[in-house]
Amino acid sequence: PQEERRTGVVYDSRLSSHFSAWNKDFTEKPQRNTKCIERCTELGLLKRCLHVPVREATEAEMMLCHTRQHIELLRMTESMNGEELKAISQKYDFIYFHQKSFENAKLSLGGVIDLVDKVVSEQVRNGMAIVRPPGHHAMKEEYCGYCYLSNAAIAAKSALEKYNLKRILILDWDVHHGQGTQFAFYDDPRVLFVSIHRYELGSEWPHLRESDYDFIGEGPGKGYTINIPLNETGCGNSDYLSIFFNLLLPVFYEFDPELIIVSAGFDSAIGCPEGEMLVTPACFAHFVNLLTPLASGKLALLLEGGYNLKSLAESTALCVRALLGDPTPNIAPLSAPKPSVVESVLNCIKILHPYWHCLEYQDVVESHLIKTEAYPFKQVLNLPPVQNIEFYTSETRPQTFPLIQDCADDNAIKLLEEYNQAIDKLIQETDLSFPASKFSLSWDKASDGVIESLTHSDVWKQCQKDVSSPQTIYAESVHAAIDSILLSKSQSSLCLVSRPARQHNGTPNGAASPTAHSAHGLAASYAVEAYQLNRVLIIQMGSGPDVHIPTSPSVLSIVLSLSSDGSDSARASLGESFVSLPLKGDSLNDVDYISAFQQIVLPLAYEFGPTLTVFSWQSLADGVQGPSPACISHLTMLLRGLSRGRLMVLVDRCAGQSLEDGRAVIQDPSEARPSPGVTTEKLLMACASVLAGHVCAPLGPGYPSQHTAQVIKNVQDELKGKWSLLQFRHQIPK
Ligand code: Q9C
Ligand code: ZN
């Protein structure tokens, strides 16, 4: 059973024997590894993982990306003396050689290859390689940027060969451009290479013209290289997550990878002097969570850079924690992305739209010719090199380089101290606790029959049993589900109720009429009143707006109305705390829902910063095609990243559906309705399986319809004044 497949972690004390002999404390140093292991141990993570040992990569493996000379020269450094090592080091850009360099590089590579192999062959669910030296700057015949062997690229090539894979995604969030990996697959459509990196219009290392957004691959690989240049420092969570929401996730869903390899460098994290960026350690766990629904969860993280020991170790540990499926720690509510980042994303969209359907309908494509101070180009699609920048080309690359050493001046030391204090504070404030039980289940009497299949499935093992009993009264079931989460009995909860029909007018025992509120309305009011929560997010999937949503400022409701006959008349009166997403269409596909989540729901949610999330399902009208069970599990996984995993899934089989047999459905698959339907059982099972920690089934490649793209755009236009994360289109002066 899949929940027993573990997270693999590669580490080995031998990887500490390679260092810069002329400056033992040089940036790329053994403590980088040991600090990561230490922190993982402290958080009790390693003992929950499967240790994947390192081993020396074979010559054949190295030759997947390198020439024989490249390997031979590296081998020769094993027997060089100090002077010879210094001399050869200076032939390369940001490289030191040590007698152990070759051995360490081979061990790292071997570990990385085996980890990826185990992920693909399902011996582990996912994993992380905490290795050094890193690999993404190593080229076919050139050592570069502390890298000797091309770890990520070789692991990908090896998996392509061995398993005949068709689609691998390599995401490189190291703050430097992974040029080595890019060159290895530049014409190969089987590998989508995506790098987010500090570029500063070309002035940042490694000084390559090839790092800009207009380098998108060649031949059959055109469109399969994506570079997102960050043209200023100080980019943080809002910038990176905006890039995920507006560019990366849509493309990833369309690509539908079978495997994801991440060149996970943490020099993009706060406090790293190399990156000068501000991504917080917890945010990397969110990246992991956003990638997890893809590729059946087959995710291998490979350590690359990261030179602030505190933020490096914390980020690494939080990524391992996220791979293990622990709830994603909260990050501070997001704010607007930097204009220069918006500009880069729009440039990427503009140049990539012929290759990706999901980018086709972005309105920037036709109306938006980018011309700013930073990019004073007439024609963005025919981009000349930026002036005054000396890019490295085969002609202009220096023959020799200075011997690398850190020269931390007083200012740098002071800055580091300040950052370290800020990081300590972040670490202290990050609540990593969570209840032992994954989810609870509550339901009302009328739903007894429906939960039966769930209690017979293997997800039931993860359920908090003592909360789980049928309640006679509708409201009690809802309250039980909230209590279970907010009293920390379970991480999340599933609640299944049938709203009493309106004509009943009150409950049999004479209690106050429950018909005044929908179940999610009850849930939100209860959470606000009984637990004083001030940010409850309701995501409502249903036929139309529900007038019983509380209009408290503590509650934000996002309604995805799916049926074409749903009325929007009520929405105007609902005011500030209500967002309507009238997806409505007869032929909505799964990725239509996913897109709405990526581009509206998640940005709003991350800006709102909920402390509790309610995912509420109401009956769909006849003939409306809801999302497939696989899609429901993806949506649940995405929402699980919010509010520290405190997610209530609420299935409200409300009025309008026949309830007499106790098996009213979200969409009834009975003979009368031939459209492929999702029964309440399947809906519950899809949600429960994610809450229990299972992986999502892949959806297959997909992209939003033009109609959905238009709805998303309309909502963005309508709300961008209020929500800074939606200001993604027209922010740049034309
Ligand atoms: N400010 C890795 O992170 N430093 N390699 C350039 C310019 C070169 C980084 C300094 C950094 C190489 C794997
Ligand atoms: Zn780096």
Image (spheres, rainbow, N blue to C red):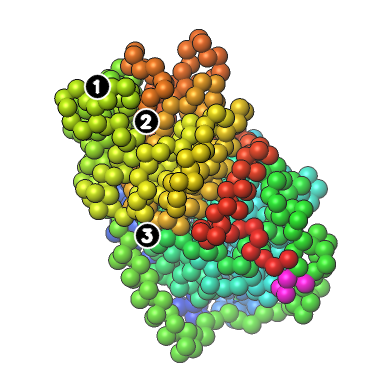
Which quadrant of the view contains residue 395?
bottom right
Is disc 1's CB within 8 Å of ligand 2? Answer: no
Q: Are marks 2 and 3 in contact (CB under 8 Å)?
A: no
Residue 35: image location, x then y, percent:
38, 65
Sequence order check, earlier mark of 2 and 1: 1
| In magenta segment, residue 258 | no
Three-letter amino acid code at the position of disc 3:
Ile
Q: Residue at x 50, y 76 (%)?
A: 273
Residue 612: image location, x then y, percent:
33, 48
Q: Nearer the viewer, mark 2 or mark 3?
A: 2
Residue 426: image location, x then y, percent:
35, 67
Residue with the mark numbered 2: 651
The label shown at residue 647 is: none
| In magenta segment, residue 374 | yes
Sequence order check, earlier mark of 1 and 3: 3
Q: Nearer the viewer, mark 1 or mark 3?
A: 1
Binning the other alpha carbons within 10 Å of mark 2 as few (below 14), some (14 to 19) or many (20 upward) gives many
What quarter of the picture does the C terminus occupy?
bottom right
Q: Residue at x 49, y 24 (%)?
A: 621
